[in-house]
Amino acid sequence: MKDPLVVIHQPDFMPYLGFFHRLLLADIYIVLDNVQYVRGSRTMTSRDKIKTVRGEQWINVGIRKPPYGCMINEIFLSEEDSWKKRGLNLIKENYRAAEYFGEIYPYMELLYSFPCNKMVDFNMKSIELLMLMFDIKDIEIKYASELKVTGKSNERIIRLVKAAGSRRYLSGTGARNYFIPELYEDAGVEVVWQEFKHPVYPQQFDGFIPYLSSIDLLFNCGIRKAKEILRDC
C-alpha cells in the first residue's frame, strides 16, 4: 500500500483553482503557517483577484502592519472591520448579476462573519468553505507549526512529508525552479508533479481571465457544475 500523498502550501486567501485541484489528489494537506509572510506585490496570502467590469481586481484581507520577518501565523487581522464590509461589497457589486449569485453569496456572508483575530484562521475558513462547495472532504489537514520541523526550502519539505508519516509529495509545477531531485532521492521521498490545465468557463463581462479566486468559477457556474469542472482539470 502506498504512503499517503502530501501537499504543502501556505494558507492563502480564497485560492485559485489549481490549489483545490491539488487537494483533490492529496491525502494530507500540510498548512505552511510558520514561514515568513511575504509583503508587497508578491503576496497571495492576504489577497486574491476577482473579475470586475474593469478587469481583474484585488480583494484584500485587512491586517495589522506586520513587523519584518513576521510568520504567517503571527499576523493579526485589522482591529477595525471596515475591510470586511468593503470585501463583501466588492463581491456583491461584481457578482450580483452572476447566474449563481444567490447560491454562493451566503457562503461569503458566512466567511466575513467568522469571528477570529488572526489572518491564518480567516484564510483557513475561506479554504474550508471552498472545500465544502467543491466537495473535497477525504483529506487530513495538519499545520506545519505543530509538526516542529526546521530547515529551508527542499530540506523543510522533505522533513514535513516525513513528519506527516509519508514519503510521497505532490508538488505544483512552480516548484521546479528550486527543486533539487538528489535531495528527495537520498531521503527516499517520491515527488509527484501536478498536471493542471486551467479550465475555460463562462465568465461575466468581456473575455476570459484565468487564475482568479475560485469564487469566480462558483458564482458563474454554480456548485454542481464547478465541482465537475474542477475534476476535469
Image (cartoon, rainbow, N blue to C red):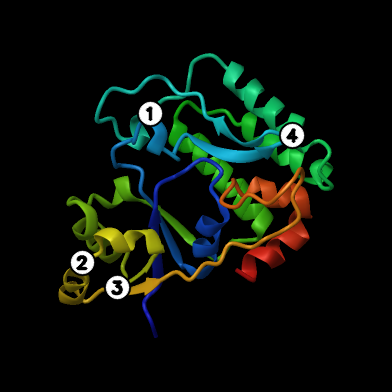
Kindly state the secondary structure of the residue where label 3 is placed.
loop
Tell me the residue at 47%/26% (across/down): 117
Look at mark 3 in the image and give the residue it sits on. 167
Q: Nearer the viewer, residue 231 or 166?
A: 231
- For the residues bearing labels 1 and 3, Cβ distance under 8 angstroms: no
Dot 2 alpha-carbon crowd within 10 angstroms: few under 14, some 14 to 19, many 20 or more: few
Of label 2 and label 3, which has the lower sequence position? Answer: 3
| Measured Cα–Cα span from mark 1 to mark 4 | 29 Å
Kindly state the secondary structure of the residue where label 2 is placed.
loop
Quadrant of the rendering where the N terminus is positioned: bottom left
Give amino acid for label 1: Ile
Q: Is residue 104 above or below residue 21?
A: above
Tell me the residue at 51%/39% (across/down): 123
Rendered location of residue 151, percent (x, y) = 17, 52
Q: Nearer the viewer, mark 1 or mark 4?
A: 4
Give amino acid for label 3: Arg
Tell me the residue at 60%/68% (across/down): 233
Dot 1 alpha-carbon crowd within 10 angstroms: few under 14, some 14 to 19, many 20 or more: some
Q: Is residue 213 left or right of residue 9?
A: right
Look at mark 4 in the image and give the residue it sits on. 94
Of label 1 and label 3, which has the lower sequence position? Answer: 1
Of label 4 and label 2, which has the lower sequence position? Answer: 4
Look at mark 1 in the image and give the residue it sits on. 75
Look at mark 2 in the image and give the residue it sits on. 180
| Measured Cα–Cα span from mark 3 to mark 4 | 44 Å
Q: Nearer the viewer, mark 2 or mark 3?
A: 2
Tell me the residue at 38%/30% (across/down): 40
Dot 3 alpha-carbon crowd within 10 angstroms: few under 14, some 14 to 19, many 20 or more: many
Give amino acid for label 2: Ile
